[in-house]
Amino acid sequence: MKASVCLVFAVVCWIAAQAEESPKILTLSKVMNELNKINHGMGNSKSLNSPTINDLKDCCVASALECFRSQVLNLSVADAKLKRSQRIISHELRKSVIVKSVSSCKPEEIQTAQCKSCDSYNKVDSRMFVQNFQTLLQKIYASQA
């Protein structure tokens, strides 16, 4: 009897710990999972504008994320499940919990940083685009955890 009570208590504690995860961490995890699905099932290579972490200033993370979000629907996928993944990513990255938490910079700092427009980034193939997107998401995830 005592062992079963301990087991139930452990399960309840685990569920409570999972509920403690912040909504932004859960959203970022969902986006990374969907992007991983796309990466494994992606077809033809298409050129897309892609920020890279090397040329990205700290106050420009939000604009880079918006650049990725705006272009994720342009990735070449044929499978309906992967198209759904694209829509999920686009939708999740619009959520205010993500948009507001990505940058801790003040508006004047963002102005001073002179972030590039999406069109000004170099074009890369789809695989490199996804890789750069994953790297940015990992950077954001690490800063939130």
Image (cartoon, helix red, strand yellow):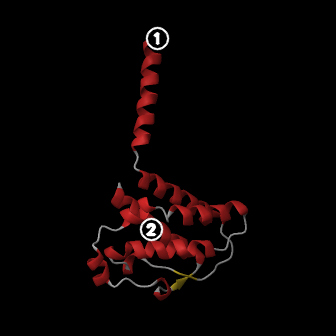
Query: How far, Cα to Cα, is label 2 from label 1?
Result: 48 Å
Q: Position of residue 23 (x, y in %)?
A: 43, 51
Task: Mark 2: give few (<14), some (14-19) or many (20+) Cα within 10 Å.
Answer: some
Q: Residues within 10 Å of mark 1 (few under 14, many from 20)?
A: few
Helix, strand or loop at mark 2: helix
Q: How many marks?
A: 2
Q: Nearer the viewer, residue 135 or 30?
A: 30
> Based on the displayed image, in which of its 4 quarters is residue 126 positioned?
bottom right
Q: Can you give x and y, in whole percent of width and height, for residue 8 in the image?
A: 46, 23
Residue 71, picture quadrant = bottom right
Residue sitting nearer the eye, 7 or 61: 61
Quarter of the image where the C terminus is located:
bottom left
Judged left or right of residue 129, residue 54 is: left
Q: Residue at x 40, y 50 (%)?
A: 22
Taking the view exactly as shown, the residue that stands out farthest to the bottom is 120
Numbered label attached to residue 1: 1
Instruction: Identify which amino acid the numbered label 1 is placed on.
Output: Met
In the rendered view, would you say 44 is above or below 79? below
**In the image, residue 33 above or below residue 46:** above
Q: Percent from the top left, x then y, of residue 121?
A: 47, 85
> Which residue is depicted at the point 31% across and 78% down?
110
Residue 53 sits in quarter: bottom left
What amino acid is found at the position of numbered circle 2 in the picture? Thr
Q: Which residue is mark 2?
A: 135
